[in-house]
Image (cartoon, rainbow, N blue to C red):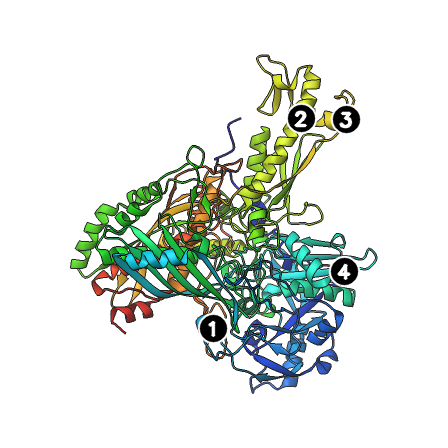
Amino acid sequence: MQVSSFNLIISKETHLITNNSYHNIVNMNLSIQVEVNGKKHRSTVEARQLLVYYLRDQLRLTGTHIGCDTSSCGACTVILDGKAVKSCTMLAAQADGCSITTVEGLAQNGELHPIQEGFREEHGLQCGFCTPGMIMTAVDLLNKNPEPTETEIRHALEGNFCRCTGYHNIVKAIQYAATKMKEKEVAHV
Amino acid sequence: MCSLIGQAVKRVEDKRFITGKGKYTDDIVLPNMTYAYIIRSPYAHAKILKLDTSQALAMEGIVAIFTGEDIAKSGVNGVPCGWQVNFNTGETMKEPPHPLLVKDKVLHVGDSVAIIIAESRALAKDAAEMVEIEYEELPCVTDPYKAIQKGAPVVHDIAPDNKCYVWELGDRQKTDDYMAKAHHVTSLEFVNQRLVPNAIEPRAAIGDYDETNDRYTLYTSSQNPHLIRLLMCAFVLGLPEHKVRVIAPDVGGGFGSKIFHYVEEALVTWASKQIGRPVKWTAERSESFITDAHGRDHVTRAEMGFDKDGKIMALRVRTAANLGAYLSTFSTCVPTYLHGTLLQGLYTTPAIHVEVTGAFTHTTAVDAYRGAGRPEATYLLERLVENGARELGIDPAELRFKNFIPPFDGVNQPGYQTQVALQYDSGNYPAVLERALEMVDYKNFRKEQEEARKNGKYLGIGISTYIEACGIAPSAVVGSLGARAGLFESAQVRIQPTGKVSVYTGSHSHGQGHETTFAQVVADKLGISMSDVEIVHGDSDSVAFGMGTYGSRSLAVGGSAIVKSIDKVLEKGAKIAAHKLEASVDDLEYAGGKWTVKGTDKSIGFGDIALTAYVPHDYPQGLEPGLDFSSFYDPANFTYPYGAHIAVVEVDIETGKVNLKRFVACDDVGNIINPMIVEGQIHGGVVQGIGQALFEEAIYDDNGQLLTGSYMDYTMPRADDVPSFEVDRTITPCPHNPLGVKGAGEAGTIGSAPAVVNAVLDALAPFNIKDIKMPLTPQRVWKAIHGK
Ligand code: FES
Ligand code: FES
């Protein structure tokens, strides 16, 4: 009945892997090196560890959230080597050698990123749970398309659920940020 | 300083959320913490024949495993229901126990069977695979209407007909008589489908027992920490309340589903004592789908009788409401007192009768979900009105104007007594529809629609008007209706010696923005800066017993409690000021943060008075030091927000796809403190209603498996499914609370679903379709068009 995110990746049922070798694989520890928000980390992770758990549990960067187990909600979105990824959908081990930005790494020298500012100015959040994922997705969108139309924004947010705002003000927040970034020509993440 | 009331002040809580520093329950890590995984029933109805945990227990990293047997032995009770609804015969409702862990027989997919506690989440899950359970599957029933038919599988032996209650309201005889005399009767049989609330933060709970002080702390994603503490201590675990602290930190949305006391909260609290370490449980989404209380799920037959001019004469409603396998905290009152009492709508209908049968089924519990009963009432009313108008050949807007209750302000004109127990507070109902029609340009739309049809384009417009009972509610009234709790709110206003203000509210914010709205109220009343005000909520150790947030009650009830405390602060402050200014209290006025002797320039500031209160050297004789007041506010009535929503759709008759082109809403939620926040609430609510109309449905198969048990299967509305909204408001103050506010949290959800469905049926008027079952998926619409 329950879909486990672990099982999505390594299914215990699969005939290719015997019970024993499954446990050997999942319990195997790997050493990885990643740069997160500009800081280098050398860590030991379980082979089956998802990136999102590595960020949350090991690095204690709890701004990246978990809203589902089917790679649908986008609450876990981070920027990995310049692109938005759902950190629940890859293994920490796969991030070895990569550079990651989480929501905690967006503000620079105490100054909010224009997208963060947009969310506040346009009331783009209520409970705040989807917000980090929304913000990181918006970072990716505005990197690729600095002047998106409303339709393009809505399309870009397809992979992110918000149950609170009805999306109306999230769209406005991203429009606000686009204008702001153009004005300021802020260096992109 | 200009008034802060009515200003779109940016939210003070946003900073932590946009920087990733919010603190939700799952973000909390306690020293020496363990992780729990709950084994759940894969069957809807089955006997547990064997449960063997020995292999799992022997695994590395497993701290403990508890089963239903352990729970039963420990003398712990099940979770209680908070509202007693009686049979129309006077017999009390059937109230089966809801154990924390099941011992003999599971009653729905997801029922909790055992809890595994381990050094990590992953290890606990691994061990779950090694627990051996043998079930004997039994026949099940998931549909409320089928459940109450003869011969249906029985959920609880104490209710062999699966009826929890049969409840009625209104005048049966009068309704039958008026209906018989009606010129035209429009009737509908329909389903208000089951929904999954789906707050994006999955539920989580951490139990932490501190042996040295014999104290428990429970962190939980809850909308009402005090209520959880009361229910858990007094009914489930039998703990002394003063030894239990419940903290609801940042909570990622609730929509009703986080009101209720869930078994996991009591389990982690209890287990923490057993193992002497903190225990954390966090739901996975698939687990949320089968354990968070669901919403709606009514099977209804309703009739509306009209006279020849289109005046509504009578309304008769028969509903089978699904309660699920167990009675969740407020499940029983939702289809009854929150549904039947709203069937007057905005209309003068002289005869109404409703009968609701609460049915047990082998499904996840059903309880309040945004709107709770009121969307169901509004849906049936607005569908009947619209169908009636079409059948009578009267314009649906015109038919509504014919039937609206005339305007009344609740001050000079009395409140409006309905046929179904409530007394509306104040309203100008025609005004909201007039405004919404103007916004959408109704007159021209009809022309456009006609033109479009000629070109093979099917445009439709759908209206919905609604009223809801919010600000729940006077304790004595709800008590007489069966509530087992009071419904007041608490507020403590603590003025610090430097004049800074800490406010402790029993309301709980999980997205509503209380830290901003409440601070606006306080700063405005005291004439100080908002940055000098801090709002504290969600911790039973610091906040006085409060009732929490649901039923759009925070500002109307919680805000009023704050105002009461502020009034007390100002009253005492005036005495100190009078002493300092050597004037009489009556000669003083308070404005702009200072007391002034009327007609002079002699004044003293709020900060000086605060300091004097705590350094009472030169001080009125006999007056206690300090400036710190608590209040409990118990409202005189519900509040009654209302509004008109209009949807414009285009239906592609080749594919059945509904394209929502415009959505217009004019709501009256009384006075407004922060219009930005109110509009945000409307937007979010509207999308949940649109979700019900077009996308969402919890579907059980015949074996009681939830087929839509993940985001891959349950269609959540996404950003590209909805347009931007056009919202406006009228303001009719609530006459019975100090802020004149009515509540805005549920309005959007209540009004929007019928507007969208009516719009689709309007677009398809040439096909003469009477009903399409929600959600109006392309498949269903296409089938309806093609008569399938
Ligand atoms: S948690 Fe990654 S998509 Fe939902
Ligand atoms: S703000 Fe709550 S889910 Fe988006």
Mark 2 → mark 1, Cα distance in angstroms: 62 Å
Q: Are labels 2 and 3 on one chain?
A: yes
Name the N-terminal-most of marks 4 and 2: 4
Image side of residue B734 versus residue B476, left or right: left
Q: Are labels 2 and 1 on one chain?
A: yes
Residue B148 is marked as 1
- Chain containing the residue with disc 4: B
- Chain containing the residue with disc 2: B
Residue corresponding to mark 2: B573
Ligand 1 closer than 8 Å to label 4 CB: no
Image side of residue B624 versus residue A36, left or right: right
Tell me if label 2 and label 3 are in contact, CB under 8 Å.
no
Residue corresponding to mark 3: B615
- Chain containing the residue with disc 3: B
Helix, strand, or loop for circle 2? helix
Q: Which is closer to the viewer, label 2 or label 3? A: 2
Question: For mark 2, does the 10 Å Cα neighbourhood hold few (<14), some (14 to 19), or many (20 or more) residues?
Answer: many
Mark 4 → mark 2, Cα distance in angstroms: 42 Å
Residue B209 is marked as 4
Question: For mark 1, does the 10 Å Cα neighbourhood hold few (<14), some (14 to 19), or many (20 or more) residues?
Answer: many
Helix, strand, or loop for circle 4? strand
Name the N-terminal-most of marks 3 and 4: 4
Instruction: Please tell me which residue lies in front, B735 or A153.
Output: B735
Amino acid type of the residue tagged 3 in the rendering: Val
Residue B345 location (% of width, % of height):
39, 50
Q: Are labels 4 and 1 on one chain?
A: yes
Helix, strand, or loop for circle 3? loop
Residue A29 location (% of width, % of height):
68, 73
Name the N-terminal-most of marks 4 and 1: 1
Residue B760 location (% of width, % of height):
29, 60
